[in-house]
Amino acid sequence: MNLAVIGTGYVGLVTGVCFSDIGHRVTCVDKDAAKVEKLRAGQSPIYEPGLEELIRKNMNEGRLHVTTDLESAVEEAEIVVLAVGTPQSVNGEANLQYIEQAAREVATAMNGYKIIVVKSTVPVGTNERIAARIGGLTEHPFDVVSVPEFLREGSAIKDTFHPDRIVIGAASREAAEKIKELHQPLTTKMMLTDLRSAEMIKYASNAFLATKISFINEIANLCELVGADVAQVAQGMGYDRRIGDSFLNAGVGYGGSCFPKDTQALIQIAGNVNYDFKLLRSVVEVNKNQRFNVFNQLVRLLNGLHHKTVGVWGLSFKPNTDDVRDAPSLEIVGMLLASGAKVKIYDPVAMERFCEMLNDPSVICCSSASEAASNSDAVCLLTEWDEFRHLDLKHIASLMRQPILVDGRNVYTAEDLNGAGLIYRSVGRPM
Ligand code: UGA
């Protein structure tokens, strides 16, 4: 099939590249000429394992194209995928300005029947509004289909090729069947539903996962007070298939461009129909407080932070990405600096993005975990990058002014720490 994908952010680019890889002809469209040039040169604008290789392969094989020319891309396409951002507005609501603009541009470029697939995360009712807006601008027939995205950063390619499910929301059965066909080579459950339910499935899924994380973080806090081990508790809970063992890792709380934004948006969606989503409000509150735990541990262990040096390992909101949007590290490093600490940071890929976002020249950038630990009074680990699991902790301790390690992601086991001589604290574990 012939596709135009509007927006080359995380969702748009990965979707476009993966659809081209399964044999469709895809044109990715973005307004940002510099980004388009970079992509044409076979470079990925985001760090995502495996993505750059797939971009090059599919461009070389002639299935993947990138352009700033939305009109021609839409004219040539049978299916137009809208994958522009819906960032958080000041009041927590999803900002629909970009998707509305994209819909307008697509409508005016239409030259015949098109299926318009909305991949962006949008509040319930938005797809219907988009359909009405497009209908007011074109004489040509079309159908709007909601296909929410469930990929995770850091494993986006794998998630796209091996999804747990594909949700297809549509008013037209024929359009839904066509979109089912588009995904055909992927073997997974395909659920056909209505537009509003599809929109809600996306928010409910993210909110549920965020709830699981805040729940286990509260259990971790309780474990600390009663002397239980949250890792053991999560393992024991996870054996129950009704609970499942994923998303039960306690730590510094969730971050990123999705959970914080989507939980707030769902609270707003509920508020707009006078429903107080109390549980979700608590999930957000717990997550906010969780970021203080590591900070408070450091204050306690170092007896205040003034004139102390703290090394920080890991800045991205999760491993295998350079994304630092709403990362716990931004807030924690900010609090450390505000308390008078000298902060030495290290991340395998997110240094540049973090420094841009933090915008504080007093932070000291290091090129390795051991450099960040060197002459520090404590180190805190905020992202569980694999390389931190393989460090020689005894050597790290010998480099430090005080051998204190606060592990915000529960990366190390008693065995790893054996003989290292570290004063070690983690989240909800007695060790
Ligand atoms: C999330 C969802 O998992 C995807 O299904 C969804 O498509 C995506 O949002 C989206 O809406 O676009 P993502 O934000 O990329 O994906 O990453 P996750 O792996 O879900 O992690 C989110 C945050 O939760 C990270 O900060 C991570 O460290 C944290 N987390 C995750 C925990 O603290 N504990 C866990 O057990 C799992």
Image (tube, rainbow, N blue to C red):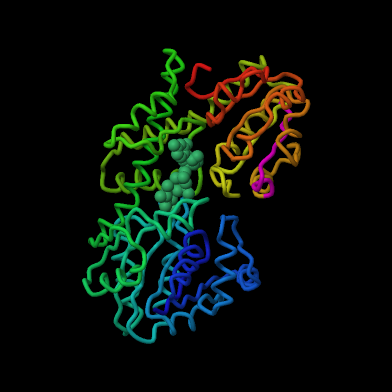
Residue at x-position 49% and y-position 84%: 72
Residue at x-position 57% and y-position 71%: 57
Residue 68 lies left or right of residue 128; in this view the side is: right
The N terminus lies in quadrant: bottom left
Among all residues in the image, which is located at the extreme bottom? 111
Count of marks placed on residues? 0
Query: Is residue 258 visible to us here?
Result: no
Q: Nearer the viewer, residue 164 or 110?
A: 164
Residue at x-position 55% and y-position 66%: 54
Q: Nearer the viewer, residue 283 or 264?
A: 283
Q: Quadrant of residue 338?
A: top right
Q: Which residues are magenta?
A: 341-352
Residue 317 to residue 141: above or below: above
Q: Nearer the viewer, residue 21 or 140?
A: 21
Relative image position of residue 259 (x, y in whole percent): 43, 45
Residue 323 covered by magenta stretch: no
Residue 406 to residue 283: above or below: above
Residue 265 lies left or right of residue 254; in this view the side is: left
Relative image position of residue 219 (x, y in whole percent): 39, 24
Q: Quadrant of residue 371?
A: top right
Residue 345 covered by magenta stretch: yes
Q: Indicate which quadrant contains ligand 1.
A: top left
Relative image position of residue 81 (x, y in whole percent): 41, 70
Residue 359 lies left or right of residue 3; in this view the side is: right
Query: Is residue 111 visible to us here?
Result: yes
Relative image position of residue 235 (x, y in whole percent): 39, 29
